[in-house]
Image (cartoon, helix red, strand yellow):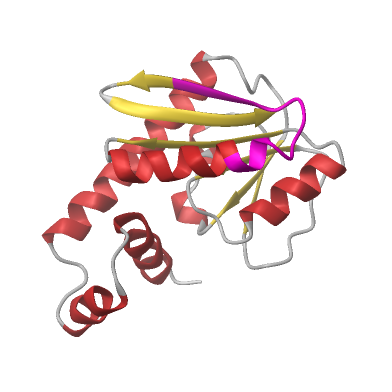
Amino acid sequence: MDYDVEMLKLYFKEKNYTKEQIETLLENNPFNKDYVEWEQQVKYNNKTLIQTIKKLNLIGNSPIQEITNHEDNCLSKFLSNQCEVKISNGNIRLSNKLILMKGFIPNQKVILRKAYSNNIPFIVGTCSKELEYYRKMKSFYEEISSEIKSSKIIETESHNQKVCLFIKK
């Protein structure tokens, strides 16, 4: 999948743009200054999120299966662990490795339910300065945590960014 296409989808979703706003951007230049700044912030958020996960000692040396929207937008590149990156496109075959995901991933609820039913540990997180997006992701984690027993939500801050992790070990 094309990186720019996948990142634009994520950008529109995170910014909660209406169909009309998206069409206007696509007719003009979607890769404007706002998008470029957002993309740089996403890269910074990725680093902050993985640093927080390491700091909380949630990963250790576990082999990891990261599920992402694009391989160039993954967290595992900041890890020395053995990592397998999979692009979420509907039907993902899960291994018994720790699952790592961040932000919006297509079919995320299905993947998490499947991981839970197969007793596969996971770490799902978000890191953002944008409160609306952060609250939306936290609400999603709270909603699914009611179905996944022995999971927990961890909230913290790092470098003026809010971090929320949803984990099942």
* Residue pictured at 20% horizontal, 67% vertical: 31
Q: Which residues are magenta?
A: 143-155
Whether the magenta-drawn stretch holds residue 152 is answered as: yes
Residue 7 at x, y = what percent?
Answer: 38, 62
* Residue pictured at 31% horizontal, 77% vertical: 19
Residue 66 at x, y = what percent?
Answer: 63, 45
Residue 169 at x, y = what percent?
Answer: 74, 25
96 and 132: which one is in front?
132
* Residue pictured at 28% horizontal, 22% vertical: 159
Residue 52 at x, y = what percent?
Answer: 46, 22
Left or right side of 27 for 86: right
Left or right side of 101 for 22: left
Farthest-out residue, right: 118
25 and 98: which one is in front?
25
126 is higher (above) or lower (below) than 104: above
Task: Using the rendered view, name the quadrant where residue 168 is placed.
Answer: top right
Left or right side of 131 for 66: right
53 is higher (above) or lower (below) than 30: above
56 is higher (above) or lower (below) than 92: above
